[in-house]
């Protein structure tokens, strides 16, 4: 990356974003044709799908490239709309809340002006309404039973039962299925992990492993903040990547930081 020209860096980021927008669009299409209960990609379920889209969102919003170019501006606005649509139709409530937070940061940092914000909100609302009219299965279930327990509730319950058994060095790697006490309570029988990086590392490696992991995250933030202060030409891109990492950290129930 250091030897790339700015034009090549721009192209690399545009290709990355274009692929992400395409992935989001496929999930939206699957959802609208009722091929899936929640939007998802070819290779992953709704949680992984929307979590990765969420990490793409700050990069898209904080692009330092020329928004005066009408073609690029159209790509930018349409891209944000499609990414948000993918997150919303995945029905992951935590991800939706964080995406709203990221949009708010974009507005506060003046990366999204009022006109574009209105366009984005109006079109996302319209297409979301149409999508949920086309596929109302999950919405109907949530309305009928809004407090329906999820597998994450079962994971938290099981974690409370195990948390003091091996606090210092944990149970060892990949021991979830052999140690978790409530496997029979899962609605999805193939669950094979904690779906939470902090819990996973604690139960596999104990306090020692978790402390090491927190130091690792601290180094990422320290390096990013230091770079943000020094490299004034790439501040927007640095901030967008820091926000992407922060999205994964905030998604404590997803388990995608590693």
Image (cartoon, rainbow, N blue to C red):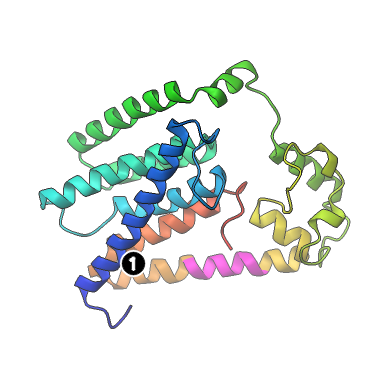
Q: Main secondary structure of the magenta part?
A: helix
Residue drawn at (28%, 83%) of the image: 3
**Quadrant housing residue 170:** bottom right
Q: Is residue 219 left or right of residue 149?
A: left
Outermost residue to the bottom? 3
Q: Position of residue 102 (x, y in %)?
A: 39, 44
Secondary element at image label 1: helix
Question: Is 116 located above or below residue 164 in the figure?
Answer: above
Q: Where does the magenta region start and end?
A: 212-220
Q: Is residue 64 left or right of residue 167?
A: left
Q: Position of residue 228 (x, y in %)?
A: 33, 67
Q: Position of residue 156 (x, y in %)?
A: 75, 42
Residue 119 visible in the displayed image: yes
Question: Is 66 located above or below residue 173 in the figure?
Answer: above
**Residue corresponding to mark 1:** 228
* Image mark count: 1
Residue 100 visible in the displayed image: no
Q: Is residue 83 left or right of residue 107?
A: right
Q: Nearer the viewer, residue 116 or 77?
A: 77
Q: Position of residue 72 (x, y in %)?
A: 17, 52
Residue drawn at (48%, 51%) of the image: 247
* In magenta segment, residue 50: no
Residue drawn at (84%, 50%) of the image: 180
Q: Residues within 10 Å of mark 1 (few under 14, many from 20)?
A: some
Outermost residue to the top? 144
């Amino acid at each position: 990356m250091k030897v790339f020209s700015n034009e090549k860096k721009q192209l690399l980021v545009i290709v990355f974003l274009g692929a992400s927008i395409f992935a989001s669009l496929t999930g939206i299409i699957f959802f609208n044709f009722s091929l899936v209960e929640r939007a998802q990609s070819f290779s992953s379920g709704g949680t992984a799908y929307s979590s990765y889209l969420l990490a793409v969102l700050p990069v898209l919003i904080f692009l330092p490239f020329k928004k005066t170019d009408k073609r690029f501006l159209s790509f930018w606005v349409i891209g944000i709309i499609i990414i948000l649509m993918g997150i919303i139709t995945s029905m992951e409530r935590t991800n939706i809340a964080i995406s709203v937070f990221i949009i708010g940061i974009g507005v506060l940092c003046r990366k999204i002006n009022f006109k574009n914000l209105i366009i984005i909100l109006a079109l996302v609302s319209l297409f979301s309404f149409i999508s949920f009219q086309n596929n109302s299965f999950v919405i109907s279930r949530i309305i009928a039973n809004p407090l329906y327990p999820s597998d994450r509730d079962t994971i938290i319950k099981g974690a409370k039962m195990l948390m003091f058994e091996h606090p210092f060095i944990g149970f060892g790697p990949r021991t979830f299925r052999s140690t978790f006490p409530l496997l029979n309570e899962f609605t999805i029988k193939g669950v094979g992990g904690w779906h939470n990086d902090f819990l996973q590392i604690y139960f596999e490696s104990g306090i020692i492993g978790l402390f090491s992991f927190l130091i690792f995250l601290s180094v990422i933030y320290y390096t990013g903040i230091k770079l943000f202060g020094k490299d004034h030409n790439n501040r927007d891109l640095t901030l967008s990547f820091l926000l992407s990492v922060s999205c994964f950290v905030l998604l404590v129930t997803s388990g995608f930081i590693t």
